[in-house]
Amino acid sequence: LDLSTFFLGRPLTSPLMNASGVWCNVNNQLNALAESKAGAMVTKSCTLLRRNGNPEPRYHTLAMGSINSMGLPNEGHQYYLDYAERHDYENKPLFFSIAGLTLDDNLTMVAQIQDAYTPAILELNLSCPNVPGKAQIAYDFEALDVILAEISAAYSRPFGIKLPPYFDIAHFDEVAEILNRYEKVSFITCINSIGNGLMIDINSETVLIKPKEGFGGIGGDYVLPTALANVNAFYQRCPKKSIIGCGGVSTGEHVFMHLLAGAGIVQVGTALYEEGPEIFVRLNIELAKIMKEKGYKTIREFQGKLKTI
Ligand SMILES: O=C(O)c1[nH]c(=O)[nH]c(=O)c1I
């Protein structure tokens, strides 16, 4: 069962990790991820100050996934810096997600991460769809360019960004052109939830979640084809960057697809929310079984090797 791999030069025992926001808000969840069979882990996207987030119900399980409008609930930046200080980096790499409400807040958090000399890897979330009144930065290409310039100037180390899904080849081209101008952007995590979906309960004839009149980010089986497309689109367009795949993963086959499409790490969100950190045991076994059946000894043998017809 050798699922070892490397990401940004760091050895991983497994290519699997949680998606930011799932099972990573508070210490007991973070400790559970640290003890799990995931090869890495990431903290909940944080803001400078603690946030309660949106009113509940704000998460609902769907037939083929989930809808959420959490509203960026988190314990505040310092809480996760304190965790990053305690984390055992020999055990697994830690990614540190931030989603400041303003550019200044992001710069303040980045400066504090810089000063903390933490080995954690920064994942800048540019795609939260659920803060009322806040558009997703990564859908505003000028704002995307500005924030990458500002963060690159303020942060001395490599970092990554969490992108929303794009649905147009011209957008893949335009966003990749921007990202390729920032060499400090060392990895790209595709995708965040498909923003502002809506699901309906026909018995009560109501929406399922309270915030934003029921509009929320969609995850799970519904998003797998979009996730794979975004992983492969940026894998092809950004040869000097690594890709983290996220979206629609609940089996070893989905993990294999993300790796084939070019992902170096594969994140699990909705399925982790439903199954808990034990899911990493199952996914590792299922992935290893597929590799054995295909005669692959290492992930490197097939990673990014998706064939066209
Ligand atoms: O509502 C949230 O907290 C949330 N929900 C998502 O689906 N993606 C995000 O990036 C965030 I920050």
Image (tube, rainbow, N blue to C red):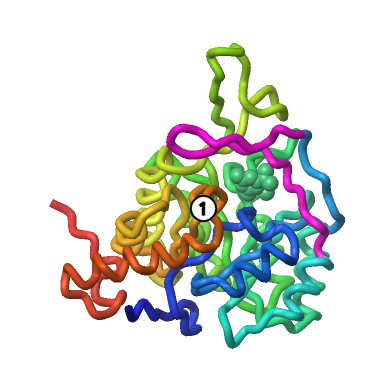
Q: Is mark 1 within 8 Å of ligand 1?
A: no
Stretch in magenta: 56-77
Q: Position of residue 97 (x, y in %)?
A: 66, 62
Q: Position of residue 73 (x, y in %)?
A: 76, 48
Quarter occupied by residue 36: bottom right
Q: Which residue is found at the position 62% from the left and 70% from the top?
A: 95
Q: Position of residue 300 (x, y in %)?
A: 30, 77
Tell me if residue 174 comes above or below residue 234 in the rendering. above
Q: Is residue 243 visible?
A: no
Q: Residue furthest left?
A: 309
- Quadrant for the N terminus in the image: bottom left
Q: Position of residue 265 (x, y in %)?
A: 44, 67
Q: Which residue type does callout 1 highlight?
A: Glu
Q: Is residue 64 visible?
A: yes
Near mark 1 (Cα within 10 A), the count class, few <14, some 14-19 or many ≥20, is few
Q: Which residue is found at the position 71% from the left and 58% from the top?
A: 25
Q: Is residue 31 magenta?
A: no
Q: Is residue 58 magenta?
A: yes
Please state which of residues 40 and 33 is positioned toward the viewer in this rendering: 33
The reply, left or right, for residue 79 in relation to residue 119 is right
The reply, left or right, for residue 78 in relation to residue 131 is right
The reply, left or right, for residue 211 in relation to residue 105 is left
The image shows a total of numbered marks equal to: 1
Please state which of residues 233 and 170 is positioned toward the viewer in this rendering: 233
Q: Which residue is found at the position 41% from the left and 52% from the top?
A: 250
Q: Which residue is found at the position 62% from the left and 38% from the top?
A: 68
Q: Secondary structure at mark 1?
A: helix
Q: Which residue is mark 1?
A: 275
Please state which of residues 133 and 90 is positioned toward the viewer in this rendering: 90
Please state which of residues 142 and 270 is positioned toward the viewer in this rendering: 270
